[in-house]
Image: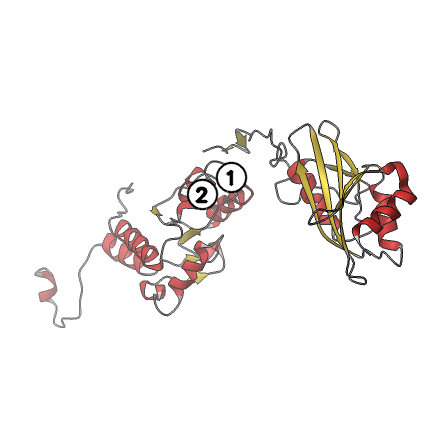
Amino acid sequence: MNASEIHQRLSTNFGPAVLDAKLDALQPWIQIAPDAIGRVCQYLSAEPDLALDYLMCLSGVDYNNGTLGAVYHLSSITHRHKIVLKVSCPKDNPHVQSVSMIWGTADWHEREAYDLLGIVFDGHPDLRRILLPPDWEGHPLRKDYKVQEFYNGIRVPY
Amino acid sequence: MGILDLKFENSNVIITSVDRLLNWARLSSLYQMQFGLACCAIEMMAASASNFDIMRFGVIPRATPRQADVMIVAGTVTIKMASRIKRLYDQMAEPRYVLSMGSCSNCGGPYWEHGYHVLKGVDRVIPVDVFIPGCPPRPEALLEGLMKLQEKVRKESLAKKSA
């Protein structure tokens, strides 16, 4: 199944939750509303003719215009097709639905996106920092990040 | 040797000072704490292998800080790791020495500006005896650093702490 067929299926089933798409890109992507990503992903993984059974990567993005985003690279081992989903959320209230109960891969990837960009994945079973120490301040991959002066009495900047 | 040893019937007597004996013993068996942090650890392992054979200096890797004399900080010290390094150093028995190997542990290396997670020099948490430059230093450089440390140990005295 190609990208426009997947887009067609999502548009008929989820209508207003499908916000935008670019289907002639090298990796065709579909923009989804952040409060619908859980339903959409459940649908994409469960439908037998879509069967997007493999989450290749879940990335977090700071678009540097007041929005953060998550990008889902999905692939079907059964049907050998691929699609990219995107969601974006405001930086001052970054909430995206978790997909970790659909693909186990998403668990640590969402923790990483939370750790480095501060995106809160609603419904995640264990949303803690994964790389940085638990008492770290801020989310370092945000464009407006300022490193803290001291961490536990150790000077951080050069 | 002095006149004193000629007084003894057999010539197998050596006269020396306690300082020199202790320093000789210490510098000839600098047991190393066995851990590596990043790519410098690969060079450290190469230094242990047959071409460079760091064991001819008496450097034997020990898996616990309680049996180690020298800590070779080989690699990037993240801020998360810094407290562990400090704890390991505190667990070592005195006299204890630290070799900082490579740019990362010397001063932060390539992460000095944008590495929010990297400690900008391991000397911010533990005292360092010898800094070895390089990214990563070749095994020869590590051996040279070790010989510098041996020279430092050789000059120590029980009476007064050397700097």
Label 2 residue SS: helix
**Quadrant of the drawing holding the N terminus of chain B:** bottom left
Nearest the eye: A2 or A117:
A2
Q: The disc numbered 2 marks a residue on which chain?
A: B
Circles 1, 2 touching at the beta carbon (< 8 Å): yes
Relative image position of residue B6 (x, y in whole percent): 9, 66
Q: Is residue A49 visible?
A: yes
Horizontal relation, residue B65 to residue A127: left or right? left
Q: The disc numbered 1 marks a residue on which chain?
A: B
Q: Which residue is mark 1?
A: B115
Q: Residue furthest bottom?
A: B10
- In which quarter of the view is residue B105 placed? top left
Nearest the eye: A144 or B88:
A144
Horizontal relation, residue A97 to residue A143: left or right? right
Horizontal relation, residue B114 to residue A2: left or right? left
Q: Amino acid at mark 1?
A: Gly
**Quadrant of the drawing holding the C terminus of chain B:** top left
Nearest the eye: A138 or B6:
A138
Q: Are marks 1 and 2 on the same chain?
A: yes
Q: Is residue B139 above or below residue B97?
A: below
Q: Which residue is mark 2?
A: B110
Q: Residues within 10 Å of mark 1 (few under 14, many from 20)?
A: some
Relative image position of residue B162 (x, y in whole percent): 28, 42
Q: Residue at x 51, y 39 (%)?
A: B115
* Residue at mark 1 to residue at mark 2: CA–CA distance: 8 Å
Q: Amino acid at mark 2?
A: Pro
Q: Residue at x 62, y 33 (%)?
A: A142
Label 1 residue SS: loop
Q: Residues within 10 Å of mark 2 (few under 14, many from 20)?
A: few
